Image (tube, helix red, strand yellow):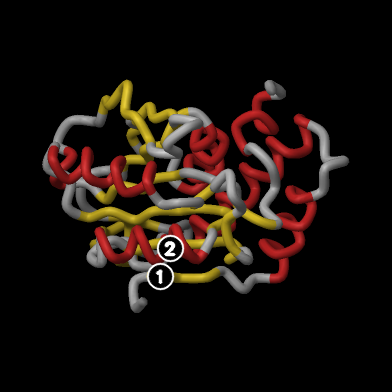
Amino acid sequence: MSNVYYMNHPLIKHKITMLRDERTGTNEFRKLVEEIAMLMGYEALCDLKTRDIEIKTPIEDTVQPVLDGKKPAVVPILRAGLGMVNGILALLPSAKVGHIGMCRDEKTHKPQTYYCKLPSFIEERLIIVTDPMLATGGSLIDAVNEIKALGGKTIKCMCIVAAPEGVKAFTDKHPDVQLYIGALDRGLNENAYICPGLGDAGDRIFGTK
C-alpha cells in the first residue's frame, strides 16, 4: 500500500493515547484532536509545491520559496471531521474549507450523504479530507467519490485511528489517494466500531451522546 502513511512520531502516539482514555473530557479531547491534526498535517503536506519570489531582507535582496498554485481545500466529513479542521488551518490559514455531511445507518453500517459543498476551482486544488475514524471505510470512500465526481483530482485523506478493514476497503477503491493514519488498531467489533478505538469521536468532540 504505497499510498498509505502511518505516523510514527512520539508526540502523535502520546496524544492518541490520551484520546483513547475514557477519562479525557470534552475540552481536552477537542484540543488533542486539533493538535494531532496539526502534527499529521505537517507530515502530510511535505510535498506542497513552491515557487521562488524576490524579497528584501534587512540585509540584502534574495530569492526565496513560497507556496504555489491555488490555495488547498480542507474538507471535513461531518461532523467529527470538523474537529481536525483548525489543526490544518493552523498550518494553512488561507486554505478554503468545504463540507461533506454523512451519517451512518446503524442497522446496515453504511454511510448516507446528506450534504456536500466544496470550494470553487476544486479541480485545481489540493484537497485534504479529514475524518478522525476510519472503520469500515464506507464514509471515506463515498466522500472521495463525491469529490472526484465534482472534479477533485489531488486528494489526501487524514484519519487519526483506523481499522485494517477500512484501510483495505479504501485503498481498493481509491488506490490513487494518499491516506495518512495516526494509529492502526486491531479491527472492528460486531457493531463495526474500531477496537480498541476511542469511542464515538463526534460525541466526544462535541460532548453529545
Question: In this picture, is 62 found above or below 134?
Answer: below
151 and 170: which is toward the camera: 170
- Name the mark on residue 4: 1
Q: Is residue 110 visible?
A: yes
Residue drawn at point x = 76 percent, y = 62 percent: 14
Query: Considering only vertical position in the picture, is 207 above or below 198?
Result: above
> Residue sitting at 87 percent across and 41 percent down?
23
Q: Position of residue 189 (x, y in %)?
A: 61, 53
Q: Is residue 50 at all visible to an observer of this figure?
A: no
Q: Position of residue 115 (x, y in %)?
A: 31, 22
| Badge 2: residue crowd in 10 Å (few <14, some 14–19, many ≥20) | some
| Residue type pointed to by label 2 | Val
Residue pointed to by mark 2? 167
Determine whether 22 is above or below 202 in the image.
below
Q: Quadrant of residue 8?
A: bottom right
Look at label 1 and name its amino acid.
Val
Give how far apart the Cα atoms at labels 1 and 2 are: 8 Å
If the image is split into quadrants, where does the N terminus sit?
bottom left
SS of the residue at dot 2?
Answer: helix
The numbered mark at residue 188 is none
Residue at (54, 41) in percent of width and height: 84
Looking at this view, name the residue that lies furthest to the right.
Answer: 23
Crowd band around label 1 with a 10 angstrom C-alpha radius: few (<14), some (14–19), many (20+): some
Name the residue located 39 percent from the left edge and 53 percent from the top edge: 157
**Could you tell me residue 102's position as x and y percent?**
39, 30
Is 208 positioned to the left or the right of 175 in the image?
Answer: right
Q: Is residue 188 above or below residue 130?
A: below
